[in-house]
Amino acid sequence: MKFLVSTVGGMTPNKGVARFWEGRVPWVSPKDMKRREIADSQDHITDAALRETNISLIPPPAVLIVVRGMILARTFPTAVTTVPVTVNQDMKALTTKPELNADFLVSLLTGIQRDLLHLVEESGHGTRCLRTDSWANFSVPLPPVPEQVRINEQLKSELAGLNTAITRLEREIELLREYRTRLVADVVTGKLDVRDAAARLPDELAPDTQDLATELSDEAESVDEEATV
């Protein structure tokens, strides 16, 4: 890897200096690494931060990887930038040499993430880290650039349907969580009265159902006490 990419690290401008923040320059951190292409971020810094600190503005396309954080306990987030960005200290930006297509590198790192996760170490305070000397010496296959492009086109075609299904399911999960939160709030605040539903339950319940009803009754009493307080 070290012969195929140049590495740029990141940093966090002083949070106590207001003129460094709320600008227009994307400042990418691990929480932004939820998509394959990075065109923006949740946090932004200003031109003043670029001028007055050691943070680097990284031109696209650059391949972003997470090198420190608990997320490395289960996955290895990888993405490619489409706009100039900066990154925080838990990230690395890899600028590819001419013989390596950046988009292909993202696909490659995603495909071998299980092998890369074996290189992750646990630091003294429990977080996970991927040291530069570990991934930089990792060997990767390198087909000719035209073949890299064809491989990527084939992958995008094959994965298009799966990605659409994943996006739809993630949205459904989000809606269910929102509904659950509203439902609990409505019951606790009394906007939703569940006493009628409880009254319609049969007198004799199956053992499992009886245990569940008892649990729910106890929980309801606890919630009612907390609401009263």
Image: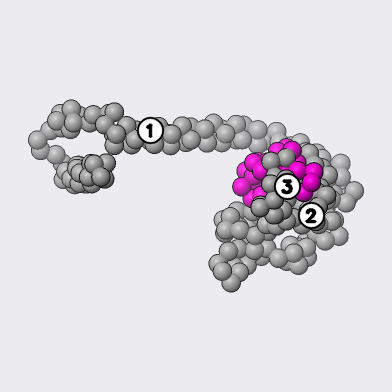
Tell me the number on the disc at residue 53: 2
Residue at 55%, 67% (x, y): give it: 126
- State the image coordinates of residue 73 (x, y, percent, origin top left): 57, 59
Residue 81 visible from this viewpoint:
no
Marks 3/2: CA distance? Answer: 9 Å
The disc, 3 or 1, on the residue closer to the chain's N-terminal end is 3
Left or right, 204 with reference to 126: left
Marks 1/2: CA distance? Answer: 44 Å
Residue 30 visible from this viewpoint:
yes
The 10 Å Cα crowd at callout 1, few under 14, some 14 to 19, many 20 or more, is few
Q: Nearer the viewer, mark 3 or mark 1?
A: 3
Marks 3/1: CA distance? Answer: 38 Å
Q: Nearer the viewer, mark 1 or mark 2?
A: 2
Residue wearing tag 1:
182
Amino acid tagged 2? Thr
Q: Write the start and end of the magenta stretch as one range.
A: 24-49
Please report contact status of discs 3 and 2: CB closer than 8 Å, yes or no. yes
Amino acid tagged 3? Phe
The 10 Å Cα crowd at callout 2, few under 14, some 14 to 19, many 20 or more, is few
Q: Is residue 106 above or below residue 185?
A: below
Residue wearing tag 3:
20
Left or right, 118 with reference to 136: left
- Dot 2 falls on a residue whose secondary structure is loop
Residue at 14%, 30% (x, y): give it: 199
Left or right, 164 with reference to 63: left
- Dot 1 falls on a residue whose secondary structure is helix
